[in-house]
Image (tube, rainbow, N blue to C red):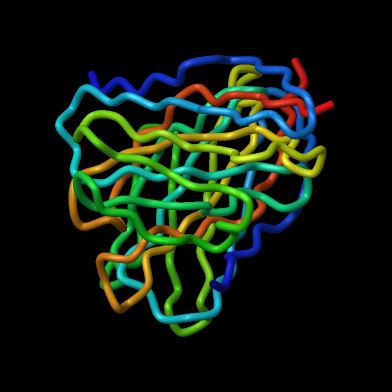
Amino acid sequence: SQQGEEDPQALSIQEGENATMNCSYKTSINNLQWYRQNSGRGLVHLILIRSNEREKHSGRLRVTLDTSKKSSSLLITASRAADTASYFCATEGRAGNTPLVFGKGTRLSVIA
Amino acid sequence: DVKVTQSSRYLVKRTGEKVFLECVQDMDHENMFWYRQDPGLGLRLIYFSYDVKMKEKGDIPEGYSVSREKKERFSLILESASTNQTSMYLCASNSPPSGYEQYFGPGTRLTVT
């Protein structure tokens, strides 16, 4: 299966700054999701954006999707030390009812 | 709240041992998944199941088998553990379709010596 690719692999910012992470994928999708993983723990779902949506917000999170470029971005505004985690994108293929395909993740460090 | 539990957080086994990793979910989800996570490789799907007694191979099934005798429980079995199976193992579940939000367990960090 074709994994998504997050960019950058690692990101370090100061508390209060915005963090932007990108995800590119290779095949047509039904939806794209973002997950967070705190060190040594399981993943937690953050947000889902469908292929017919272009932008979605949830609290301090903003996700965009550009299906023509097969890419998505996750913006975390006014970051906090507690946002330090790895962030993964995951896609559901157009065929439907197929398992999610996860990217390799972006490691975000927010320095207080 | 959905809860997915895994039988152990940390496990140390010897090469050649048979290893069982258990996963239980309490939300009556039809779909369950097993992943392994390694640095630089992200999450890779080992096996998944859409119903009791059903199983499907994921991307890296070699060296693993699974069992789903009850809807809430999905077991991953390493028939003969090897050092290259040292990894973090994550279980997840969701309701159909399988491509929607998944709920993850806390993970089992397995070390094979």
Is A109 above or below relative to B66? above
| Residue B55 coordinates in the image, percent (x, y) | 33, 54
Residue A57, position as x, y percentages in the image: 34, 45
Rendered position, A20 above or below A98: above
Q: Nearer the viewer, residue A56 or B78?
A: B78
Depth order, front residue of B99/B54: B54
**Residue under the point 69% across and 23% down:** A15
- The residue that appears at 58% across and 65% down in the rendered structure is A4
Residue A32: name its quadrant: bottom left
- What x and y, as percent, mark residue B67? 36, 40
Q: Residue furthest left?
A: B28
Q: Between B19 and A99, which is closer to the camera in this rendering?
A: B19
x then y, percent, for residue B21: 50, 27
Count up the numbered dots: 0
Q: Nearer the viewer, residue B44 or A7?
A: B44
Q: Quadrant of the N terminus of chain A?
A: bottom right
Quarter in which the C terminus of chain A is drawn: top right
Q: Residue furthest bottom?
A: A68
Q: Quadrant of residue B110?
A: top right
Q: Could you say which quadrant of the image residue A59 lies in?
A: top left
At x 56% / y 48%, what residue is drawn?
Answer: B64
